[in-house]
Amino acid sequence: MKHVKTLTNKTLKSTMEKGGCGECQTSCQSACKTSCTVGNQTCENQR
Amino acid sequence: MIHQYKNNGYNIVMDVCSGAIHVVDDITYDVIAAYEENNNKNRETTLEGLHASLPAYSVEDLKEALEEVEDLKEQGELFAEDVYKEFVMDFKKRKTVVKALCLHIAHDCNLGCRYCFAEEGEYHGDRSLMSYEVGKQALDFLVANSGNRRNLEVDFFGGEPTMNFDVVRKLVAYGRSLEEPYNKNFRFTLTTNGILLNDEIMEFANREMANVVLSIDGRKSVNDYMRPTRNGKSTYDIIVPKFQKFAELRNQTNYYVRGTFTHHNLDFSEDVLHLADLGFKQISVEPVVAPPEEPYAIQEADLPQLMEEYDKLAKEMVRREKEGNGFNFFHFMIDLTQGPCVAKRLSGCGSGTEYLAVTPWGDLYPCHQFVGQEQFKLGNVYDGIQAEEIRDEFKLCNVYAKEKCRNCFARFYCSGGCAANSYNFHGSILDAYDIGCELQKKRIECAIMIKAALADQEEKETEEA
């Protein structure tokens, strides 16, 4: 594409079927303890 | 739903429901805005209509941009529908398991931090240390309630956990003894103010702790004002050399120096950079959450300056990264390719269901921030969850259950925000702490800009090569 550079394509919808294993880190255990920062967690289930 | 913004010379378009993120040129940015407006008004977007509303561009250029926009739409990467509202209905029926505990190993502290939500470690109660027996029971409770989850997390929290470190050591040994028989993997973490850190504790932590959180606010004056000792003395000089050593021993990974900024240091980017200049590579500096009447509380009027600070920090981080002197800032971390699944993004932090806090005497609360608020007591480590109605309230707490979140562009990144903050400001876990939301949205925008800038850099380097 000439006008668009895609940083990431559709990743959310595809996780509806396989996702939800729950093995990933709990967000407040990482550092925050006063906010909620789920979006920065990494999936542990190699899709 | 689209969210588009300009930051540091980048035109960024987030397609909220697909998760796709694009960097576009000016004409495409404007075409997308017009397209979204038409969508919201149920109007078709035509080339003629575009030319009428965007006369500065030629018809040929508009045609080309429009074709690319429609192409992306076709591929499901732009204007994707929200298909998750239905998904969340099924999701409510899910059986939850406990996978993480915050153990309040000591309701006592050797510091007198002004902003402490734990009231200098006491959490609206008396000073108390967790006994080994209570901690052991907590780990048994965790294993028994964790179903098939293999990775279990236990944070040694306080107050100050190093004030009861013998119990920490024994609990780690006990946890390890449960791993093989129950097919579990414990990830222990420690949050400490550093005062009692010594070589022995560091050596133990480096062997056993998956992560350590080291509390320091930044510049000496800032740190010492908010984090004095109980008798008002400086802590900066005591903790900095220990934290530097600790970080090096951990190879500059799997730790955070973690600070809090307040109304007193609205120029907090200076504190982040100060920590980076001290050599720390893993940094988290977060806004204080406090009742508005406190002198150090962040006020709505502080927001414009804080937004600028985030922008300034983001730009400086890009500059340092390009120089090969980068560092990681927790609130700008964003995983665009291997990030959390939708189920995780919808369910949020898991407080009250997957994540529980345990008091020194074994009571269970939805998270560390609810400890001491009796109406949220869930049960205890001996009898398990007794107040199922409270747990169910937390289980139903998701982005679509919150009026303020339902149509917010950030909903899949913050996952509805912190339930405790919502409760403290509005008396309900289904609301949202508004100042926190504004800052969160800004951080997401900055984090994505950083990704765009680094992708740009990578591209230029490839071209040059």
Image (cartoon, coloured by chain):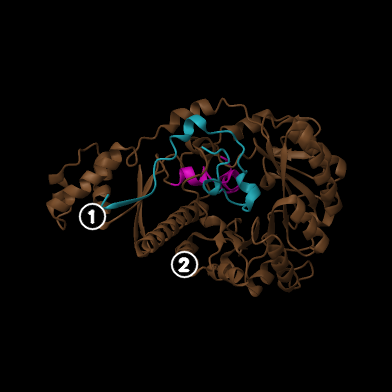
Chain colours: A cyan, B brown
Residue appearing at x 75%, y 71% in the figure: B238
Residue appearing at x 63%, y 48% in the figure: A28
Label 1 to label 2: alpha-carbon separation = 29 Å
As drawn, the residue found furthest toward the front would be B465
Above-or-below relation of A24 to B279: above
Instruction: Classify residue B347 by image quadrant.
Output: top right
Tell whether label 2 touches label 1 (CB within 8 Å). Answer: no
Residue B298, given in percent of the width and then of the height, sits at 55, 61
Three-letter code, disc 1? Ile
Above-or-below relation of B302 to B156: below
Q: Residues within 10 Å of mark 2 (few under 14, many from 20)?
A: some
Residue A22 seen: yes
Three-letter code, disc 2? Lys
In this rendering, position of residue B103 left or right of residue B10: right
Q: Which residues are magenta?
A: B410-429
Return the disc, 1 or 2, that comes first in the chain's sequence.
1
Above-or-below relation of B405 to B194: above
Residue B445, given in percent of the width and then of the height, sits at 43, 55
Image quarter hosting the C terminus of chain B: bottom left
Disc sitting over residue B322 in the figure:
2
Disc sitting over residue B78 in the figure:
none
Classified by dominant secondary structure, the portion drawn in magenta counts as helix
Residue B427 falls within the magenta-colored stretch: yes
Residue B429, given in percent of the width and then of the height, sits at 57, 40
Residue B51 falls within the magenta-colored stretch: no
Disc sitting over residue B27 in the figure:
1
